[in-house]
Amino acid sequence: MNNLWAPWRSQYIQTFADEAKDDECVFCTAANSEDDDNHYVVTRHEHCFAMLNLYPYNSGHLLLIPYLHTSSYHELTDDAYRELTGIVRPWLSTLDKVMKPQGYNFGSNIGRVGGAGIDQHIHMHIVPRWAGDANFMPVIGDTKVISENLHETMVKLREAFVLL
């Protein structure tokens, strides 16, 4: 078997060690920061915000995150839940306009057993998909090719986002 060096994966793996060290939630850090660009926060709303996934499955991989630090949707207020789910359609429209995907994966992984990488703070994923994006590189090479710089994607999406 050949190895393909993917140094960015070590950053992802290190986040688990970093979380164990300081127990600070990466989403709460982004929510409480005034430096949206550094945290790739694209939009802010009253009860939630949208940010780019730092370790995306594809270009444009968005996370919709409530400000409330909770592992359960049941603990969100009705207003927070409505806003969180209500920004999905405008984000799909924005991604359609900017990224022109052919499909999406959308949803939440709740709890560690449910597949959540960050299980202590609920969030939704919107992952744009294109034909061939699951080609041999991720399947055989265990390497994901992201076609655009996160900062460039953030700027494009921020400029295009309009609540419908």
Image (tube, rainbow, N blue to C red):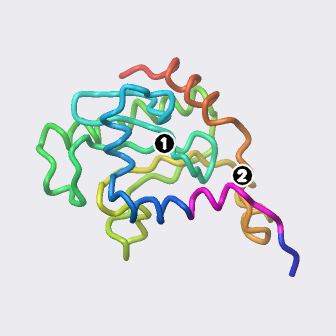
Give the main secondary structure of the magenta stretch: helix
Three-letter amino acid code at the position of disc 2: Ala
Residue 66 is situated, as x and y percent measured from the top left of the image, at 27, 43
Which element carries disc 2, helix, strand or loop? loop
Residue 137 is situated, as x and y percent measured from the top left of the image, at 79, 62
Quadrant for the C terminus, please: top left
Quadrant in the rendering for residue 22: bottom left
- Residue furthest to the right in view is 2
Residue 125 is situated, as x and y percent measured from the top left of the image, at 44, 50
> Which residue is disc 2 drawn over?
131
Magenta stretch holds residue 5: yes
Quadrant for the N terminus, please: bottom right
Quadrant in the rendering for residue 9: bottom right
Chain-order first, disc 1 or disc 2: 1
Residue 150 is situated, as x and y percent measured from the top left of the image, at 62, 36
- Residue furthest to the front in view is 21
Residue drawn at the location 49% of the way across and 23% of the way down: 158
Horizontal side of residue 137 vs 66, given as left or right: right
Dot 1 surroundings within 10 Å: few (below 14), some, or many (20 or more)?
Answer: many
Horizontal side of residue 86 vs 125, given as left or right: left
Does 15 appear above or below 28? Answer: below
Three-letter amino acid code at the position of disc 1: Leu
Q: CA distance from mark 1 to mark 2?
A: 19 Å
Q: Which mark is residue 62?
A: 1
* Nearer-the-camera pick, 78 or 50: 50
Which element carries disc 1, helix, strand or loop? strand
Magenta stretch holds residue 29: no
Horizontal side of residue 147 vs 95, given as left or right: right
Residue depth check, mark 1 versus mark 2: number of the one nearer the observer: 1
Quadrant in the rendering for residue 97: top right
Residue drawn at the location 15% of the way across and 57% of the way down: 74
Q: Which residues are magenta?
A: 4-13
